[in-house]
Amino acid sequence: MQFPEFLSPDFTKEPFCSAPDVSTEPAGDGFLPENFYATTIYPEYFKIGGEWKMLRQSRMDSVVVIRDGEPVVTEPRRVREGEQVVVGRTDDGSRGVYVHANCFAEPKESGSSSAFAFRTGQSRETSFSRAYDDLYDVLRYDRDHGYIVWVLGPACVFDFDSRNAMAKLIDKGYCDCMFAGNALATHDLEAAMFHTGLGQDIYTKKLIENGHYHHLHTINLVRKAGSIERFLQQHDLHSGVMDALIRNNKPFVLAGSIRDDGPLPEVIPNVYDAQDAMRAHTRKATAVICLATQLHTIATGNMTPAYCETNGVIRPVYIYTVDISEFAVNKLHDRGSLSVKGLVTNIQDFLVHLERNLE
C-alpha cells in the first residue's frame, strides 16, 4: 500500500530558526497553569534547548510537560505539582510551538478545480464506492503490518448476518483489539445462548415470549461463571464476536456506563481506568473502524492522533466512522478529528459487504 508522503517542516527557515524556546510554567496541586497549551490530532513540535523536537504518541485535548529535556504528552489529571507545563496558545512556530497540520502530501487526482461544486459533503445520498475500496486496501495492509482497532455498538450483533460477519473478520485477522460497552458483549452472548437480541430473534426478528429476560439471564450466568470465557466454555457456545476475540486471543476493552445492567465481569466500571485501557491500544492503532456507537466513537477519536510512526516512518492513522445517522457520522468530524472518513449506511449491510469483499 502506498501512503501519502510525510512532509517534514523545514526548521532552517523562519519563523522557526529565530523562534525562542517553548515557554513553560509549573503546575499546581491538581491544576494547570492558566495559559496551558492543549494538544491536537496533528504532529506537533516544540523548541527545547534550541532544537525542534516532535511530540511522540500524541492525542487530542491533552497537555505537554517537559521531562529530561523532552516534550511528553499526558492527561491533565496526571500532571504532578511542580512539573513544567508548556504554556502559550500560539502554534505557528513563532513562539516555540508548531502544529504541522498539512503534514501529508495530497494525492494528485484529475477532476474539477473549480471553487464551486455540488455534493462535497457526506450524506445518505453520497456514493461510498471509492471509500469502500480504500478501506479494503487499508485493512488488507494493516492486517499484516499495522494494528486495527474496532469500536462496536450493540447494533452490530442484533442481526444474524452482521454478527457472523464481524466474527469472521476477527477470524481472518482483521482485528487486533475491540472497544465496546457492556451492551455489545451482553447481547452478543445473549445471541449465542438464546439466538436473540433484547428478546428478539436475531434472524427472523420475531419477539420471543419473556425474551426481555434473556439479556439479564445471560449477564447473571456470566457473572456466575466468573468470566466471559468460562461462560462460553461451560455452555459450549461457539459463535459470535466475543467467542471469536477469545479464540483468537485478541484483547478487548469494555467500558462501563451509568446505564449498564449487571454488568459483565470484564466491564471496567471506572471511566478513567477504561480510558487508560483504551489509550494503551490507540497509541498503537494504525486503523480505527467505529460502528454505530456515537459516544465510544467520539471517545476513541479524541484519543487517536491523525498520524503514527511505524518502523521509523510517519504515516496516517485511518479512522472510519459508520452509522445510519448522518449526525452520528459527522459528529466526530465536528469535534476536531478532521482526519476521520465517514460512511452513512446500515451497519448490518456494511459488515456483511465488508466481510464478503475481504475474502
Image (cartoon, rainbow, N blue to C red):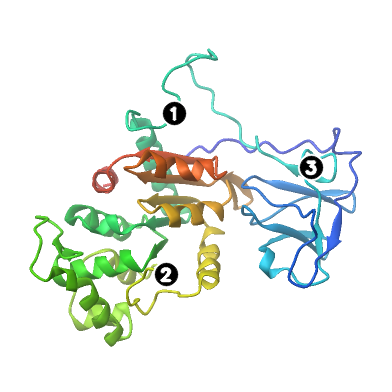
Amino acid type of the residue that numbered disc 3 sits on in the rendered structure: Thr
What residue is shown at x 80% (from left), y 60% (from top)? 33
Q: Is residue 12 above or below residue 162?
A: above
Whether residue 31 sits left or right of residue 331 in the image: it is: right
Q: Residues within 10 Å of mark 3 (few under 14, many from 20)?
A: few
How far across and how far down the image is residue 84, in percent?
Answer: 83, 63
Q: Is residue 353 above or below residue 222?
A: above
Disc 3 to disc 1, C-alpha distance: 30 Å
Amino acid type of the residue that numbered disc 2 sits on in the rendered structure: Ile
Q: Residues within 10 Å of mark 2 (few under 14, many from 20)?
A: few
How far across and how far down the image is residue 139, in percent?
Answer: 40, 47
Q: Is residue 28 above or below residue 39?
A: below
What residue is shown at x 80% (from left), y 53% (from top)? 35
Q: Which element is circle 1 on?
A: loop
How far across and how far down the image is residue 303, in percent?
Answer: 56, 56
What residue is shown at x 67% (from left), y 46% (from top)? 43
Whether residue 231 sits left or right of residue 130 in the image: it is: left
Would you say residue 137 is visible in this rendering?
no
Residue that mark 2 sits on: 258
Which numbered mark, 2 or 1, is in the foreground of this view? 2
Labels 2 and 1: the sequence-earlier one: 1
Disc 2 to disc 1, C-alpha distance: 35 Å
Amino acid type of the residue that numbered disc 1 sits on in the rendered structure: Gly
Q: Which element is circle 3 on?
A: loop
Residue that mark 3 sits on: 90
Whether residue 109 sits left or right of residue 16 in the image: it is: left
How far across and how far down the image is residue 106, in percent?
Answer: 57, 29
Q: Which mark is residue 121?
A: 1
Whether residue 137 sits left or right of residue 310 in the image: it is: left
Disc 3 to disc 2, C-alpha distance: 39 Å
